[in-house]
């Protein structure tokens, strides 16, 4: 009977293969940890995506804070189009090089002659009064071992704080300073970059943020400090401020709040910079690592912006 049915439909096996292929390519999400992160498959970011697909990606980002797409063969134009779907792209970076012909795409390329400078927990550019919304990172060259990236959830950290500490921190504000990051570039070999950073320091320099913030979309509370840029609690002497920050930084550094992502070539990562910290592990010297990054300044789906 099966043979007769197959003979009546000469395209039976082709149709079956097409159905199975579609099933394999169905959009699928697997959470990485209970606190943060998800890996998504069944979508090709090199294709023109529908608004429904873009909205799904955005919602998954909001729900999981950082999302990953492996085996993506995207062009610089694809990268830019995806970034534009989230909001306004950051202007060219004053110091980091860019992908040739595409000044919006920062080229993060490191080896033993150019070691990484992001091997510290940080939330991007919190020394600005309005830090960036998200970044989209595309892995081009991956070392044979090492070079993983850590992310952690600032809302999960807040939820785990003792209630008395939550109340104590509620009214505090903290200074976020560009100074140490700037000083790392100031040496005899890159005077031009140091000059550009000094100009940036004059413009942005530092900002003051509440220690406890709310996410603009989810309204979840966040512990909004980071070791990379948070320098002092406003109104405290330096001893008390350093003691409190040391306690909080140590509290934040728990595996329960984190994920560790092992890269493969042609992987796209998107993270919500408003509610995460990250740490790029610089353990792969003398090997070569190259990543392309676009930063998106604002969330065009945030009704407060429109």
Image: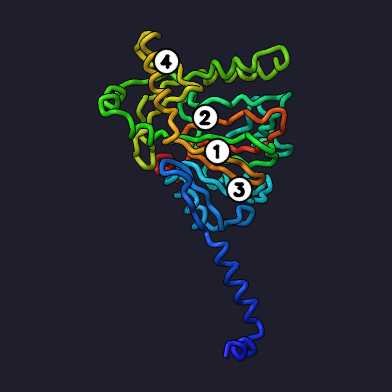
Which image quarter: residue 193?
top right
Q: Find out whether the residues at labels 2 and 3 contact each other: C-beta distance under 8 Å.
A: no
Task: Sort mark 3 into few (<14), some (14-19) or many (20+) by Cα contacts within 10 Å.
Answer: some
Answer above or below: position of 135 versus 47. Answer: above
Q: Nearer the viewer, residue 229 or 227?
A: 227
Tell me which label, 4 or 3, sits earlier in the chain. Answer: 3
Label ID, residue 135: 1
Q: Which residue is mark 3?
A: 81
Mark 2 → mark 3, Cα distance in angstroms: 22 Å
| Residue 273, position as x, y percentages in the image | 48, 35
Q: CA distance from mark 1 to mark 3?
A: 13 Å
Of the two numbered discs 4 and 1 on the same chain, state the one appearing first in sequence.
1
Label 1 Cα neighbours within 10 Å, binned few <14 / some 14-19 / many ≥20: many
Neighbourhood count class around disc 2 (C-alpha, 10 Å): few under 14, some 14–19, many 20 upward: many
Question: CA gap, disc 4 to disc 2?
Answer: 17 Å
Mark 2 vs mark 1, CA separation in Å: 9 Å
State the SS at label 1. Answer: strand
Residue at image position (61%, 91%) is 4
Which label belongs to residue 124? 2
Q: Which part of the image, by quadrant, shows the N terminus?
A: bottom right
> Number of callouts in the render?
4
**At which x and y percent is residue 169?**
31, 23
Q: Which quadrant of the structure image shows residue 232?
A: top left
Q: Is residue 224 left or right of residue 112?
A: left
Residue receiving disc 4: 232
Judge left or right: residue 297 versus residue 141.
left
Picture residue at 60% right of the left edge, 75% below the top: 16
Q: At numbered mark 2, what does the secondary structure look like: helix, strand or loop?
A: loop
At a point 64% along the width and 26% down the height, the residue shown is 116
């Amino acid at each position: 009977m099966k043979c007769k049915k197959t003979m009546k439909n000469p395209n039976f096996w082709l149709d079956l293969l097409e159905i199975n292929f579609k099933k394999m390519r169905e959009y699928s999400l697997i959470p990485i940890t209970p606190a943060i992160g998800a890996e998504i498959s069944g979508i090709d970011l090199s294709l023109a995506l529908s608004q429904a697909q873009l909205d799904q990606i955005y919602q998954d980002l909001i729900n999981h804070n950082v999302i990953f797409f492996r085996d993506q063969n995207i062009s610089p134009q694809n990268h830019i189009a995806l970034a534009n779907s989230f909001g306004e792209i950051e202007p060219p970076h004053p110091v980091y090089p860019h992908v040739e012909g595409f000044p919006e795409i920062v080229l993060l390329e490191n080896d033993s002659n150019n070691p990484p400078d992001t091997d510290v927990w940080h939330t991007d550019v919190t020394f600005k009064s309005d830090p960036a919304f998200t970044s989209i990172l595309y892995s081009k060259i991956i070392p044979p071992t090492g070079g993983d990236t850590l992310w952690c959830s600032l809302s999960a950290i807040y939820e785990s704080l003792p209630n008395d500490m939550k109340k104590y921190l509620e009214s505090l504000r903290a200074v976020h300073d560009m100074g140490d990051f700037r000083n790392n570039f100031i040496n005899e070999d890159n005077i031009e970059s140091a000059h550009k950073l000094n100009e940036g320091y004059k413009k942005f320099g530092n900002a003051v943020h509440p220690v406890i913030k709310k996410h603009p979309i989810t309204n979840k509370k966040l512990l909004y400090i980071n070791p990379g840029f948070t320098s002092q609690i406003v109104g405290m002497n330096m001893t008390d401020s350093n003691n409190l920050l040391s306690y909080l930084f140590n509290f934040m550094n728990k595996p329960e709040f984190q994920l560790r992502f092992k890269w493969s070539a042609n992987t796209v990562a998107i993270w919500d910079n408003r509610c995460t910290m990250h740490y790029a592990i610089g353990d792969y010297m003398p090997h070569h690592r190259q990543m392309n990054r676009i930063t998106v300044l604002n969330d065009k789906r945030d009704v407060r912006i429109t």
